[in-house]
Amino acid sequence: MPARINNAHVADKPSMANDALVPEKTRVEKVNDAYHYYLTFKDLHFGAQVGTVDTLSIDNTAAERTDLGGEGHEKKYSTSQVQTN
């Protein structure tokens, strides 16, 4: 699944935070009427600073965080939502 974080102010431009997303480990699964979201982030280096995603909310629901570790200190966030019609 293609995954990208867009710039909040410029259409079709990736956000600086996009470099923290690990797209090959990001996916959405549909099981019956529920969607399960899995997003993985790594550290983001800019100059001498390092940024990280410590919390993530989707539709005001906090996603569960699993620390994966590794060189980029990867973190996987997961949450589920039931589809309503």
Image (cartoon, rainbow, N blue to C red):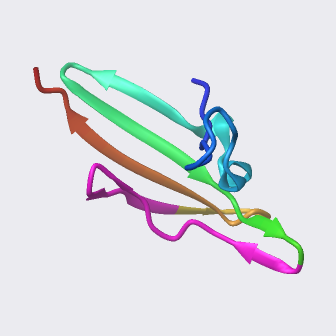
User: Does the segment drawn in magenta span residue 62?
Assistant: yes
Check the image and name the residue furthest to the right.
Answer: 47
Q: Is residue 67 left or right of residue 55?
A: right
Q: Nearer the viewer, residue 37 or 44?
A: 44
Span shown in magenta: 48-66
Q: Position of residue 20 (x, y in %)?
A: 69, 55
Q: Nearer the viewer, residue 42 or 44?
A: 44
Report the residue at 12% width, 26% height from top.
Answer: 84
Q: Which of the image's four quarters has the N terminus?
A: top right
Res. 65 image quadrant: bottom left
Q: Nearer the viewer, residue 59 or 72?
A: 59
Report the residue at 51% width, 32% height from top.
Answer: 27
Q: Position of residue 35 (x, y in %)?
A: 30, 30
The count of marks equals 0
- In the depicted structure, whether residue 49 falls above or below residue 10: below
Check the image and name the residue furthest to the bottom.
Answer: 48
Q: Which of the image's four quarters has the C terminus?
A: top left
Q: Is residue 6 left or right of residue 48?
A: left
Q: Position of residue 29 (x, y in %)?
A: 39, 26
Check the image and name the residue furthest to the left.
Answer: 85
Report the residue at 60% width, 43% height from top.
Answer: 5
User: Does the segment drawn in magenta span residue 13?
Assistant: no
Q: Is residue 25 left or right of residue 72?
A: left
Res. 45 image quadrant: bottom right
Q: Nearer the viewer, residue 68 or 3?
A: 3
